Amino acid sequence: MGYTKLSVTIPDEIYADMKELASREKVKLSHLVTEALFEKARKMKEEILIQQINSAFEDKDVSEEQHRMAEVIAGTTDLRELPW
């Protein structure tokens, strides 16, 4: 994986907190910032996906089709055959 240098302006308080955490955890500040950015991006992508799924289920046709599929699956599945 390659690396890119990034210059950002953050509040002094956040910088001090990050430096303290990095020192306490014995990791480089850049490592801590990278982890924080990665986690924030992951959460944002997850929220976007959830919004897309919710939008799809708001569609009446999709909702009705899902309901029909669930009924078919429930009606044709022998629960005794499932591993749980």
Image (cartoon, rainbow, N blue to C red):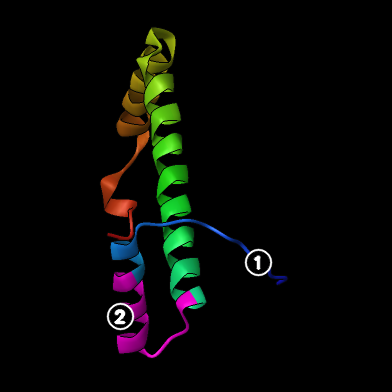
User: Which residue ends up furthest to the top in the rendered image?
Assistant: 60
Q: Work out whether residue 28 or residue 2 is closer to the camera in this orientation and state it.
A: 28
Q: Work out whether residue 76 or residue 84 is closer to the camera in this orientation and state it.
A: 84
Q: Give the residue number, with chain letter if any, for mark 2.
A: 20
Q: Give the residue number, with chain letter if any, for mark 1.
A: 5
Numbered disc total: 2
Which image quadrant is residue 25 in? bottom left
- x 47%, y 59%: residue: 37
The residue range painted magenta reads 16-29
Mark seen at residue 76: none
- Inter-mark Cα distance, 2 to 1: 21 Å
Q: Position of residue 45 (x, y in %)?
A: 47, 44
Q: Position of residue 75 (x, y in %)?
A: 31, 29
| Image quarter of the C terminus | bottom left
- x 37%, y 81%: residue: 22
Q: Is residue 83 left or right of residue 7?
A: left
| Image quarter of the N terminus | bottom right
Which image quadrant is residue 74 in? top left
Mark 1: amino acid:
Lys
Above or below residue 5? Residue 59 is above
Q: Position of residue 8 (x, y in %)?
A: 52, 57
Mark 2: amino acid:
Glu
Above or below residue 77? Residue 52 is above
- x 72%, y 70%: residue: 2
